[in-house]
Every structure is written in C-alpha cells, then in structure tokens.
Amino acid sequence: MDLSNLTIHQINDLLKYREVKSVDITNSYIKRIKEVDPVVSAYLYNDFEEALSNAADADKIIQKNKDFPYLTGIPLSIKDIFLIKGKKTTCASKILDNFISPYDSTVIRRLKENNYVFLGKTNMDEFAMGSSTENSAYKITKNPYDLNRVPGGSSGGSAASVSSDLCAGSFGTDTGGSVRQPASLCGVVGLKPTYGLISRYGIIAFSSSLDQAGVIANDVLDAAIMLKAVAGFDEKDQTTRKFEIKDYPEIVKKADKSAMKGLKVGIPVEFFSEGLDPKICSRIMEIKELLKDLGADIVDISLPDTKYSVAAYYVIATSEASSNLERYDGIRFGSRFSKDEGVQTLDELYRKTRELGFGKEVKRRIILGTFALSAGYYDAYYKKASLVRKLIIKNYKDSFNDVDIILGPTSPTPAFLIGEKMSDPLSMYLSDIYTISVNLAYLPALSLPVGVIDNPTKKGGVLPVGLQLISPWATEARLLSVAKIIEDEVKFRQKYSAKI
Amino acid sequence: MDNSGYSEIGNSLLHGLNRQSAGTGDKQDKAGFGEGRLTSFEAVIGLEVHSQLLTKTKMFCSCQNIFGKEPNSMVCPVCLGLPGAIPVINLEGVRLAVKAALALNIGINKKSLFARKNYFYPDLPKGYQISQYLDPVSSNGYLTIETDGVKKQIRINRLHIEEDAGKLIHIGNESYVDLNRAGTPLIEIVSEPDISSAKEAACYLKELRDILVYLDISDGNMEEGSFRCDANISVRRKGDKKLGTRAEIKNVNSFKFVEKAIDYEIGRQINVILSAGNVLQETRLYDPKENVTKPMRSKEEAHDYRYFEEPDLPPLILDAEFIEEAKNSIPELPQAKRKRYANEYALTSYDCEVLTQNKKIAYYFEDLIKANAVNNKGKVEIKKISNWVINDLLFALKTVENQRGSKENDMPEPEDFLNLMLEVTAGNINKNSGRIVLTEMLLTGKKPNDLIKENNLAQVSDDKGLEDLIKLVLDENPKELADLAGGKDKLLGFFVGEAMKKTKGKANPKKVNEILKRLINSRTRGPDGI
C-alpha cells in the first residue's frame, strides 16, 4: 500500500483509528524518496534513522493517548534554513558546509513537541536569495511537473518535496515570496503568515524585517494544521506578537461557500498589467468569475505604489542581508585558511573565506546592501526605501478599508526553464513582483493551485498556476477559509498531480 | 559624507585592542614650549565614556554578566552570534541606563531605537554591535564639575545603550577569542566639547564615575576596562571661533593617564600648529609607557559603520511609570552629599571630598553619625568622627586589605567604633593604641574593650609609676640631659620618645610631657625652678 500520497489530515485519520503506524507511513516516504529524489533533488540530505526513530516514538504516544497533536507521526521536510540541534544546517551555502547546529529553532522545538517525523532538509537558494533554487551551492532541484524547469525559490526544495510526495508537508521561509512562488510553480499550497506570527528564532536570517516562516502543504487544511502547530508568541523573538492563535484547522473544516456571499474581493489593477502571462491571467479571471458566482462582490482596486515595491524590497532586503551575513567571517564559520593557502592577515582571512564561501548571488546582494547603507547613500537608498515601504503599507491599509481580501496571481509566469533567468538577475527579481509587497506590508498571503496551463516545451505536459490571496494583518483564519472554499470548488488535487 | 546624517558620531572604543599602526609615533619635547606661546591657545575637549552596567545578565540574552570566568563559558547562541539567534532586550539594563541618565540630568526619550553598527573584528561575533544611533534612550543633559574652586557645567549630548564586544587574547603568534564579555551591557555617555583642560577632563570623568558607582550602575574600574574613556581633542588660538581639527585619543585606561594623555595631545597639536603644520583628523592611541599618542588610523581609513535600525528589535518604549521608578531609586549623589556635609556638619571641603569619594565610606560615615546621636555611652564631636574616618579608618582598611589581599572587608559596628573613639577621648588609651585596636576590630570583628584588655593597651597614667620610669630615662641619658639644659630644646622630644618606648607606647603622652618637663626643670634649674 502506497501511503506517501496522502494529506496530513488523511494520515492523521489513519493514525487515530490505528489503521496504520507512523513507522509504516514513514517507510513509504523513505522508499519513495530513494526512488524519486535522485531525479527531483528536493532534499539536501535525509536522515532516515532519525525519521524512523521519530516515527517509533510517535507510535508509542499514539498507542498511549487518544488525544495527540495533529502532527504526531507526520513525516515532514524542513527547509535547510531552520536550525535543528545536532543536525547540519547549511542554508545551501558552502560557508556553512560544516555547521552542526547546537540548538533548536523555535519552529523545530514546537514541531518536536508535536511529535513530528523529520525526514530531511530541503534544498533552497543560498541564504534564501533567489527565486529558482538554482542558487544552491549544492544541487539544482527540478520541478516535479517538468524536470527541465525550476521549482521556484527560494523554498524550491520544500515545494518540490511536497509536490512529488516526498513528504506530507514542508516548512519553508518567505522573505519576498519564497514560499508562495515555489508553491505556485509546483502546484501546492503555500502560506506566508503575518510577520510576527511565527518566531524567527533559530531561522537563519536573510532580511530580518521581511523573513517569515511559512508552510507548504498539499491542501489548505494541511496548511492550517501546520500553522497552528508552530504559530504564537516567543519570548526569544521580540518581533513576535501576542496574537490570538485560533484553531485554524477547525475553522477551515467549517468553511462554507455560503460565506462568500457579500465578501468583498479586491482585484488590484497593478497585478494584471504588463509582464503577466496571458494564460495565467485567464486562469485567475476564471476564479474571479467563480467567486462572483458564489455571491462575492468583486471590487477593482488600485495599489498605486506597487511599481516601487521591487526596488524598495531589493534595497531593504539586501541592506539587512549585508549586515546579517557579516557573522560569516571565517572566524567561526567556513573553512579556516592557513598561511600555506596564502592567508597571512586577518583581512586576507575575511576576503578568502567570503570569496570562496559565498555564491555569486549572495555576493551581489551583500555588495548591493553594503552600498545602500554607506555613508552618503543611506538617505538616497535605505531611507527612501523605508519611506516607500510605508506607502505600500498605506496602499494596503486603504484597500482593506474597502475589501475583505485581495486576489491576484502569485507569479507572473509559470515555472521557467533551468538556466533561463540565471544570466538576467532583474528578470529573476521580477518573478516575485506580486509577492514582494506583501512582505513589505507584513501581511499574510496564501498561494493556492487553481489550474494549469499547457507546458510549451513538453508535449501533453502541464504547468500549475497559483492564485494569491492577501488578507489584512493577522487574519489568517479568513485567508485560510476563503482559500478552502475556492479549493473545494476548483478541486485541483483531484484533477492534477506531478505524475512523477 | 556628512550630509547623510550618518557620519561618525558615536565612534566607540576598539575595546582595548592594540590595533596600532606601524608608524613610529611623533614624539616631542613638551618642555620646549614657552609658557606664553602655550597660553595663547585653548583646548576643546569632548569625552566619550563607556561604562559596563552591573546587571545580572547580558544586554540581549540571559547569559550571566560576570567577570573572570573560564573563556567562552558564559555564552549562548545569541551572544555567540550563531546563525538564527535573535537578541532580546534586557529591561534591567534599560532601567540602569535610565537611572544613570536621570542622575546626569539627561532627558529620557520615551521612544528610542536600537541600531546596528557594522564592522568586522574577531571579537565581534555578529559583525555588528547593537547600539543606539539616531534615537538614543536619552539626550541633552549636563554635569557640573568643580576645578580649583570654579564650577562649570559640561553639557552631555546623549547617553545610549549598547553591548560590549568580546576580548582577544594574544599569545605569541596566535590570537584567541573569548566571548564571555560579548553582549555585556554598556552605556555610552557623550559630552559636548565643553571641556577646556586635562584637569577638567579628569574632574568630569571622576565625577561621572562617582555618580555611576553610587548608583550601583558601574564598578567604575578603568584598569579592568569596565569604565573606559575616549577623548576628542582639538586646539585653537584664543579668540578663534572656528574649531580646530580634532584627533580622537583611545586606550586611555586609567585615571592617572587621562590627564597625561590629554596634556600630551594638546601640546602635540599646538606644536604642529606652531611649526606651521596641519593637525590631521585621525584616531590616535595613547601609549602610557612613553607617554605619547601615536596615530592609529586616519580619516580616510575610518570605518563606515553603516548604521541602520536593528530589525530584530522593536522600538524601546518607556512608560512614565518605568521612568518614575528609576527616578525613585536614585540615592543622594556625591555632590549633594558634599554640600550637605559642609552645611550640616561644618566640615571642610577637603573632609567632604574624602568622605564622599567612596560610597561605602560615605554611607558608613552617615551610619556613625546616626549611631552617635543615640549612643548612651557618650557623644563624639562630628569633626572628630570625620577625622577618625579620614585619618584612621582609611589607613586601617588599607592595612587590612594588604594583609588579606581582598577589598571586601566588613566595617566595624558603628557603635563599637564610636566607643573606641570615646575610650581615646577619655584618655583610657592613647591615639596610637586606638589605631591598633581599630585595625584589630577590622581583622577579628572583636569589640574594642575586649581588644584593649587582651592587648593590655590601657594607658599607663598613674603618676608614680610614670615618674619612676621617666627618672630612669633621665638617668640613662645624662649627655642628652646636659645638652637639653644647654638650650637644645628639641631633645625634649627625644626623652618623650624614650619614655614611650619604656611603656611600650601605652603611656599617656600628655602625662609624659608634663612629668618630663617638671623633672627636667627640677634637675637642670634646681628645686626653685626658673
């Protein structure tokens, strides 16, 4: 019996009624990873010993208790940006090649408290900088729908691992779209919660004011289950808030299409302008019509400063990154070069460590950020970008005075070919054009697979299309409910799969 | 560069690192200046003071804030700067900073921001120091100093919170990093350039330290680096409105050196100007061995710290209650104490100064006065109490410190000390024995009367016994007696000394003098006297 194509809530049902053991489920995934991952390359490494031991522990808990946390015995993959005690965490960078974490991130601590099963660490763009996972220092992850195409990024390994059933769900991070865009390109659900809902403690920082952990799941209910397990205030991260953590899974289960009646859905004109693939546009328009049919009020809105969001984002994110990455200086991380290797002075040690330890894109962003923060340029770049950020926040605030939720595409294009955008960073940066402003505004957003378009380079093949839903600050319950209603209508999972 | 608003203002210490440039330093002969040429210049000095805060834990993590432990034993992911670690503000550190600011008349900003100061150094594990930049926790204050009887207000630009770096230990060709100190809470206090001499600078620094020590905010130890000072110095011709080019002097790590380093630097700059050269804007390092400052890095080599708001921390918001509580926890400060001692107890300014130099001593002096008021065995004059504290207690404490090798010694019970004073006043023991008893009290914790008995220190005051003794002394020294008679009055002291020796110091010196004079008179001038 293949148990590796189930959702988390399906596995949970099976475990609850003692139909299977977590060890069986886990073995199914291990078998599939061994077969499929050599082709997909979603994982940087697996730890099957750990997985089976976690599963055995979970089975004991399930045996003893009637009530156990939702994620008990559920095999998950983790983006290699979350620190796990005693495990290698590289952030897909050479500079952390030999880094074994001495502590657990808060997300992992909470997952452990939920008795999850750790399958392995997934591939990503180095330090989460990228939109295709091609910036990994270790391997190139393939899109399960077309192995010649990218899975998106930076959480590309996580999205590919869920899409190709190499785990039941995955935790990623989203700084400018790094959960939503790969979820969109791989045909799975990607949720980026409100900034401050999930602790960043123990997540390797890219851009501290934008980074937020997110979940990649097979369906909306799974996303709700995963969010509930890790969300909430953490005294170790003062940017987390004391939000009320709702019972998202129960809310999602109760979501009913009758709730769409009178719901005001905003369609920002800026999300349907130049650069959007017309076939993606028509898929999104179909959803608009669907919502109209369900009784929603469709409202055309404008987020006038969207055009500045990519520029503002790349100033803020790179500035913060240039500082966050200063700790990788060769004193404690990275290879220690000796005199024999031509390193005589401290300065040479810094230079050589960072020259060899960081990849091209990381260096590009460090240089950009360092420049933007330099004396004499701060006002023109960082300060200006911060002001733009305030405008974007205001755009959304104004819009949410009129609408309950905003809808648009997640990505302007479907999954692109491996290598297609590597020589053109600007076009790569634009693949996050619809997702970036959400991070700048600290808002929650979700990418939901709503259909496919024909794959122009693979006869008979399709490529998934993701719908992005954006809701006001700390309204994850609404976001998940609306997503669930659309999901039930679209039935993507029943119609399409990566077939790998 | 400066139009960004982000030029270097809070240029902090390099934390004791000897990043000395290879330059030889420009030695000069200060004695070569003519007084007249010197006095046609004035110095403009601003001080940046860093003080560690005496909190239980570090500024942004829960590691113990403690000195002298095994290297890298007081560390956690946060202060090690491990990937993924995030700082958390220590409110106790904030409270101490606010308390210090209030004591220095500095305005508290209800909203302030933490900022990152970016630079690479092995003792800085994150590659940036968390500090405050554009919006410090407090700004605009002053400190009143008094030099040679003249009072002057030194304006304070700001007081902000930051974290200390770790330490490098150099052994031979190798350098080791100890991060126990990394993350220790610091306050940086930046004065306006209102200081005009090395003496004023030293006075400002001392006053500042006294206040912080009184407030239990700092241990004020310059040698151990928990209290540090950088000086920005420039000179200009008197009457000039425009400021001269400044040099920043680092590594001034003892009170003794503050004046020396500043004096040297003022002299050096004047010399440069007089020899038609230009003073360079640069950072210089003080070398206490040679008593010179040496160039460390020029303006061109200065760091661009790329300050920006610390995105890992929310703004620091202080409510009125927090500030009020900090205000209420401020005790009477040394300046106020000195004023009160002078008014209430009519003590000299010297006495007031010495009594308030050390908080422990000042509080003990006040305890003595309180105990004296209710002591039913008798009262000691306040001036006498002050003398005992200043002349005898401080001496005895030093003796005990040396014997024990520790500065942590308990004071005697105030009542016991007062009783000892009464014994001396009453003539039951002499002053010298009093000192011995005091030292013993500190060492053993015993009561003064027990110590007097144990050591057989009661004064020999009975006239008959003393007279016999003194007669003996006179008999033993006929030559000196003859000389004394011949007019060498100084020899009287010799006889007193001999008599005291015979009584092992226990004789009442007044009595000895009396008897001695009487006997000498009778022996040298005959029974009729003069």
Image (cartoon, rainbow, N blue to C red):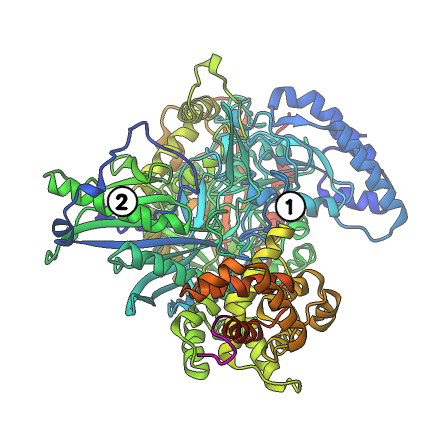
Chain ID at mark 2: B
Q: Is residue A370 left or right of residue A196?
A: left
Q: Nearer the viewer, residue A111 or B335?
A: B335
Residue B49 in sight here: yes
Residue B392's image quarter? bottom right
> Residue pushed farthest right?
A64
Residue A233 in sight here: no
Tell me the amino acid under the disc marked 1. Val
The N terminus of chain A lies in which quarter of the figure? top right
Tell me the amino acid under the disc marked 2. Tyr
Q: Identify whether A337 is placed above or below B236.
A: above
Q: CA distance from mark 2 to mark 1?
A: 58 Å
In reply to whether residue B25 is colored magenta, the answer given is no
The C terminus of chain A lies in which quarter of the figure? top right
Chain ID at mark 1: A
**Residue A180 x, y percent position in the rendering:** 52, 42
The residue pinned by badge 2 equals B264
Q: Could you tell me which secondary element the residue under label 1 belongs to? A: helix
The residue pinned by badge 1 equals A107
Magenta extent: B524-530
Q: Identify whether B366 is placed above or below A313.
A: below
Q: Residue at x 82, y 43 (%)?
A: A14
